C-alpha cells in the first residue's frame, strides 16, 4: 500500500509510442473474446483476503479459474517483471496489477488493452482514480486500491497543550512549539514525511507544491516549476529541515522509518498512508501510541492541503488469450460487494465511495471519513509514458535541495528544463 504530477507527451512522441516507440514494437496478439483459466499477477497479500476472494470466484467458475502469481515486493521489481513479460509478448499473465502512474506507459506501448467503458461501472468509483486509469481519454485499467496521504498527530499531547488540530503549516509549527515544551514530549521532533531519495520523495514534494497552491505540471503536460507557488512548496520543506521542524534523520525516511518514529513517540506529526493506522494502534506492546493519536487531512499554506493519489489498477494484458474472462474477473474483484468483503478483511483503501459509508467499516476504520476527504481532493501523478524518468529527476533535485547540495532556485530550474525535455520526448 505504500505507495504509496498529469502530463502528456508531445504529439511526435505519442505517435512513436503508439507505434511501439520507446524500445517496443509490440502488436497485440491476444484474444479479446477468449475464455478459460487465467493468471492474475498481483501484489502479495499478507492478510490472505485476496486468495479467499479468488477461491470464491473459482468455486463459481470451474472452467475459468484464476491462479494468483505474486509479483516482487518492491514497485521497481514489479514494474520490471511486468515489462519483461510484455516485451516478449508473453501470455503468461492475463490480469495484471499496475501502479497508478504506470497506466500511461503501459497503454501507450500497447501492453494493456482498452476496456469498454459501457461494461464497467466507472461512475461508481472515486473520480480521481478513474481519471488516473485513463490514457488519452480512453479507459485502460480499473481502480482496485486507492489512497491519499494523511496527517497523523499526537492527540493526547495536543489536548494537553491546549492547541487545535492544525489546518495550515503555520498552525502546525505553532502547535509544535507548544507541544514540544511539555515534559511528556521530551526527545520528540515536530514533523516528518518521506524524504529519502525514492518515489515517496517525489510524492511529498508534489504535495508541498500543491499545498502551496501550485502544481508540478499543468493539464496540458507543461512543467510548472518556475512559479512562486512551486518555490514556496520546496522552500517550505528546505526551511523545515533547516529550522528543525523536520529532524535531520528524516532525510533517510521512507514510509516504514517514519511510521516507526511516530510509533515510538519521536514525532508529533507524521504524513503517511492509511495502512499504518492499525500498526500504530496495536495493543500488543509494539506501539507506544495506541489510542493517543488522531488523523486529519494534510495541511496547506492557506488552509487544508492536497495529497497525491496512490493506489493500484487492474488491467488486461494485451497478449492474453483469455481476455473476456480477464475482464469479467476484474468486474468481480472491483464490484461493490467484493470491495466491501475485501475491506472487512484488510486495511487496503477501496476505490468506491459507497464503501466509506458502511457503518461497520467506519467502526472498524475510524479514519475512513478523513481518508475519503483526502481522496476526493487528491491529485494524480503525471500520466507520463516516461514517468520513471520524470520521478528520478524530481527525486535527485529535491534531495539535493533538502540536503543543502543545491539551492531551491537551481533545483527548480533543473527540474523545469529536464521535465520539459521528457514531456517533449527528447
Image (cartoon, rainbow, N blue to C red):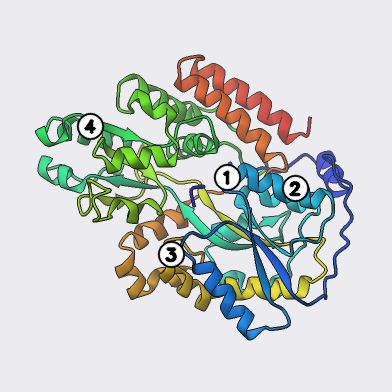
- Residue designated by label 3: 346
Pair 1/4: label in front: 1
- Residue designated by label 4: 188
Q: Which mark is residue 337?
A: none
Counting from the top left corner in percent of width and height, residue 154 is at: 22, 44
- Residue designated by label 2: 83
Residue at x 56%, y 29% (from the top left corner): 395
Q: Callout 3: few (<14), some (14-19), or many (20+) C-alpha neighbours within 10 Å? A: some
Q: Callout 2: few (<14), some (14-19), or many (20+) C-alpha neighbours within 10 Å? A: some
With 277 as the anchor, is 17 left or right in this view?
A: right
Pair 4/3: label in front: 3
371 or 23: nearer the viewer: 23
Residue at x 75%, y 47% (from the top left corner): 83
Q: Relative to residue 7, is residue 67 depicted above or below?
A: below
Quadrant where the C terminus lies?
A: top right
| C-alpha separation, residue under disc 2 versus residue under disc 1 | 14 Å
Q: Earlier in the sequence, mark 2 or mark 1?
A: 1
Counting from the top left corner in percent of width and height, residue 336 is at: 52, 75
- Residue designated by label 1: 74
Mark 3–mark 1 CB contact (< 8 Å): no
Q: Earlier in the sequence, mark 3 or mark 1?
A: 1
Q: Callout 1: few (<14), some (14-19), or many (20+) C-alpha neighbours within 10 Å? A: few
Mark 4–mark 3 CB contact (< 8 Å): no
Q: Earlier in the sequence, mark 4 or mark 3?
A: 4
Regarding mark 2 in the picture, which secondary structure is present there? helix
Counting from the top left corner in percent of width and height, residue 328 is at: 68, 76
| C-alpha separation, residue under disc 3 versus residue under disc 2 | 28 Å
| C-alpha separation, residue under disc 4 versus residue under disc 3 | 31 Å
Regarding mark 3 in the picture, which secondary structure is present there? loop
Mark 2–mark 1 CB contact (< 8 Å): no
Regarding mark 1 in the picture, which secondary structure is present there? loop
Amino acid at each position: 500500500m505504500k505507495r504509496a504530477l498529469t502530463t502528456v507527451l508531445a504529439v511526435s512522441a505519442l505517435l512513436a509510442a503508439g507505434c511501439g516507440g520507446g524500445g517496443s514494437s509490440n502488436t497485440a496478439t491476444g484474444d479479446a473474446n477468449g475464455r478459460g483459466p487465467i493468471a492474475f499477477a498481483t501484489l502479495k497479500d499478507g492478510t490472505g483476503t485476496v486468495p479467499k476472494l479468488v477461491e470464491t470466484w473459482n468455486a463459481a467458475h470451474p472452467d475459468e479459474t484464476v491462479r494468483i502469481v505474486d509479483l516482487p515486493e518492491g514497485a521497481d521489481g514489479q514494474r520490471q517483471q511486468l515489462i519483461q513479460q510484455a516485451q516478449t509478448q508473453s501470455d503468461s499473465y492475463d490480469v495484471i496489477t499496475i501502479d497508478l502512474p504506470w497506466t500511461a506507459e503501459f497503454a501507450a506501448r500497447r501492453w494493456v488493452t482498452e476496456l469498454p467503458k459501457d461494461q464497467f461501472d466507472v461512475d461508481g468509483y472515486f473520480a480521481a482514480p478513474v481519471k488516473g486509469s485513463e490514457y488519452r481519454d480512453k479507459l485502460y485499467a480499473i481502480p482496485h486500491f486507492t489512497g491519499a496521504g494523511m496527517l497523523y498527530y499526537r492527540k493526547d499531547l495536543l489536548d494537553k497543550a491546549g492547541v487545535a488540530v492544525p489546518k495550515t503549516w503555520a498552525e502546525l509549527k505553532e502547535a509544535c512549539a507548544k507541544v514540544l515544551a511539555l515534559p511528556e514530549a521530551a526527545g520528540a521532533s515536530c514533523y516528518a514525511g518521506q524524504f529519502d531519495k525514492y518515489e515517496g520523495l517525489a510524492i511529498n514534494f508534489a504535495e508541498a507544491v500543491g499545498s502551496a497552491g501550485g502544481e508540478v505540471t499543468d493539464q496540458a503536460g507543461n512543467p510548472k516549476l518556475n512559479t512562486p507557488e512551486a518555490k514556496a512548496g520546496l522552500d517550505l520543506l528546505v526551511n523545515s529541515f533547516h529550522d528543525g521542524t523536520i529532524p535531520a534523520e528524516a532525510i533517510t525516511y521512507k514510509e516504514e522509518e517514519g511510521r516507526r518514529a511516530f510509533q515510538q513517540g519521536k514525532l508529533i506529526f507524521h504524513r503517511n498512508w492509511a495502512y499504518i493506522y492499525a500498526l500504530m494502534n496495536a495493543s500488543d506492546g509494539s506501539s507506544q501510541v495506541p489510542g493517543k493519536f488522531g488523523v486529519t487531512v494534510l495541511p496547506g499554506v492557506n488552509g487544508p492541503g492536497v495529497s497525491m493519489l496512490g493506489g493500484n489498477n487492474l488491467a488486461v494484458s494485451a497478449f492474453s488469450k483469455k481476455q473476456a474472462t480477464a475482464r469479467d474477473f476484474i468486474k468481480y474483484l472491483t464490484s461493490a460487494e467484493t470491495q466491501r468483503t475485501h475491506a472487512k478483511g484488510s486495511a487496503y483503501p477501496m476505490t468506491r465511495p459507497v464503501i466509506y459509508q458502511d457503518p461497520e467499516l467506519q467502526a472498524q476504520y475510524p479514519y475512513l471519513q478523513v481518508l475519503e476527504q483526502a481522496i476526493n481532493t487528491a491529485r494524480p501523478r503525471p500520466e507520463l509514458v516516461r514517468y520513471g524518468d520524470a520521478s528520478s529527476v524530481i527525486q535527485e533535485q529535491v534531495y539535493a535541495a533538502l540536503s543543502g547540495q543545491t539551492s531551491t532556485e537551481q533545483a527548480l530550474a533543473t527540474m523545469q528544463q529536464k521535465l520539459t525535455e521528457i514531456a517533449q520526448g527528447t
